[in-house]
Each structure stands twice: as C-alpha cells, then as structure tokens.
Image (cartoon, rainbow, N blue to C red):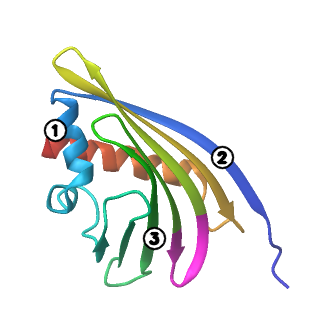
Amino acid sequence: MTERFVKHATFVVERTYAASPARVYNAWADPTAKSKWFSKPDIFEFRVGGREYSSGGPPEGPVFTFDACYQEIVPEERIVYTYTLDSGGKRISVSITTVEFIPAGDGTKLVLTEQDAFFDGYDTQEIREHGTNAMLDALGKTL
C-alpha cells in the first residue's frame, strides 16, 4: 500500500512591473489578456464565486487540470482564489492564493502569497514556487 501524507507550505513572490495597477489587474481579470501568460481557460468566470478551469499539457503528458474558485475580488487591489491541481487525473495539491496590486511610483508591486497542501509527494513547494516565478516573468513580458 502507498504511504499517504500531506506537506504544507507557504511562499511569497514579489514583482514590480512598469505598468499601472489597473493594467496589471486587467491581465488577471480579462481572459484574453490572461491567456497570453497563463494557460488558456476552458471556463473563465471572473467574479466572487466564479470558476476558472483549464486542462492540458505537453503531448507526451501528463495532463494538468487547474480548477479555481474566486473567493474575493477587490478591483485593482486584490484577488483571492482557491484551487486544486491534478496531474494525470491524480489530485496533487489544494491551494489558496492571494494576489495584491500595490501602487509603486508609476508602476505596480505585485505580491503573490500561496498557501499549499501538497499530497503524497507528487508536487513540492520548490517546484510550485519555480513555476510561479516563471509565470510572473511571463506576465511581465506581456505587460
């Protein structure tokens, strides 16, 4: 029998972008803008209680499924969502993410805090934090 366990972790990633809080926020709130730096959603309901869902991956697999629910949205200030991540049909984590948009001169300081429960060693804080950094770098290139 496979040993089952949960590993909890929290990490914070910060970026400063040379774009207004409204523009950076819109990159999260608009599905066309978001699909330029994040996976293209199959479902995108940007409202409190709304769902964001995408599923895909490289041709050789595995398929990753991101299934989020928006818990709080304060336009141009904060987005809070919870999400599950599955790999190849197996649940690998459950997370809560807070994204803050803070005016910084003519730009925006983005602070992303993620709290995770990783299941059975299928994912780790280091892998998730690396992916989040790459994601926010991609966001910066689109801004």
The mark nearer the N terminus, 3 or 1, is 1
Above or below, 89 against 57 in this view is below
Classify mark 1: residues with Cα within 10 Å, few (<14), some (14-19) or many (20+): some
Foreground: 77 or 112? 77
Above or below, 129 against 44 in this view is above
Mark 2, residue position? 9
Q: Residue at x 29, y 77 (%)?
A: 42
Residue type for callout 1: Arg
Residue type for callout 2: Ala
Q: Which residues are magenta?
A: 85-93
Percent position of residue 94, x then y? 60, 62
Could you tell me how far apart the alpha carbons at marks 3 and 1 are, in whole angstroms? Answer: 24 Å
Foreground: 24 or 120? 24
Above or below, 41 against 18 in this view is below
Element carrying mark 3:
strand
* Viewer-nearest of discs 2 and 3: 3
Mark 1, residue position? 23
Element carrying mark 1:
helix
